Image (tube, grey):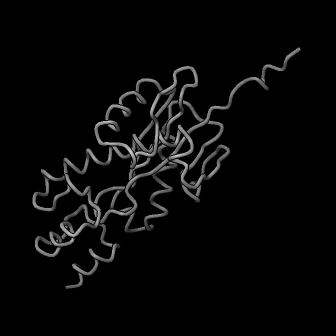
Amino acid sequence: MIDTLQQRPLLVAGVDEVGRGPLAGPVVAAAVILDPENPIDGLADSKKLTEKRRESLALEIKEKALAWSICRAEVEEIDQINILQASLLAMKRSVESLSQQPELALIDGNHCPELDCAMEAIIKGDSKEPAISAASILAKVARDNEMVEMEEKYPGYGFAKHKGYPTKQHREAIIKLGITEIHRKSYAPVQQQLNL
């Protein structure tokens, strides 16, 4: 007799975050449980895909995945507990928000959040594990879209273009226009402006 419990595949969630480096905006994490019966072609590290491809894959992931969720840690939380802890908090929230709880979470990077399931941290996991790739795509599309909206709220900073990352254009805008409520005050280039 075959032990059916042994045959049952684990519910595996891929988890990734986007937005550790920017000077502005939240850090966004996603968790995805892919459906082995409904594969998605072309999953890869979100940074290696074109914006158009990411957008279409994000829609496909939301349609085909067994479960997915997108969560965040706010700028205030980043400033209070530091970006690493805020990233782990966003990841924890994304896993806990899934409609089905995974038995194993594959986390991109070398740190794991506190979760009630088995975990494995995988360096460069977004290019090795399809579920992590899917999470990186959802997180990046969600965060990029939010930063495009911030362009309208805070014109002149170029958020739609650089998404809050410390480009020359962004650093010059901070000096010229000052900081906004979505800037991370614990980050050096923003702190310098505060101390002027």
In-image side of 76 versus 168 (left or right) = right
- Position of residue 50 relative to residue 178, above or below, is above
Extreme residue toward the right, this view: 1
Q: Residue at x 60, y 43 (%)?
A: 105
Viewer-nearest residue: 23 or 77: 23
Q: Residue 43 location, x and y as percent? A: 46, 36
Viewer-nearest residue: 108 or 190: 108
User: Within the image, what quadrant is residue 35 found in?
Assistant: top right
Viewer-nearest residue: 13 or 45: 45
Q: Residue 56 location, x and y as percent? A: 33, 31
- Position of residue 10 relative to residue 23, above or below, is above
Q: Residue 108 location, x and y as percent? A: 54, 51
Extreme residue toward the bottom, this view: 196
Viewer-nearest residue: 125 or 103: 125
Q: Residue at x 51, y 26 (%)?
A: 66
User: Within the image, what quadrant is residue 73 found in?
Assistant: bottom left
Q: In the rendered picture of this protein, how many numbered marks are placed on residues?
A: 0
User: Which quadrant, please, contains the N terminus?
Assistant: top right
- Position of residue 99 relative to residue 191, above or below, is above
Q: Residue at x 19, y 85 (%)?
A: 196
In-image side of 192 versus 123 (left or right) = left
Q: Residue 135 location, x and y as percent? A: 46, 41
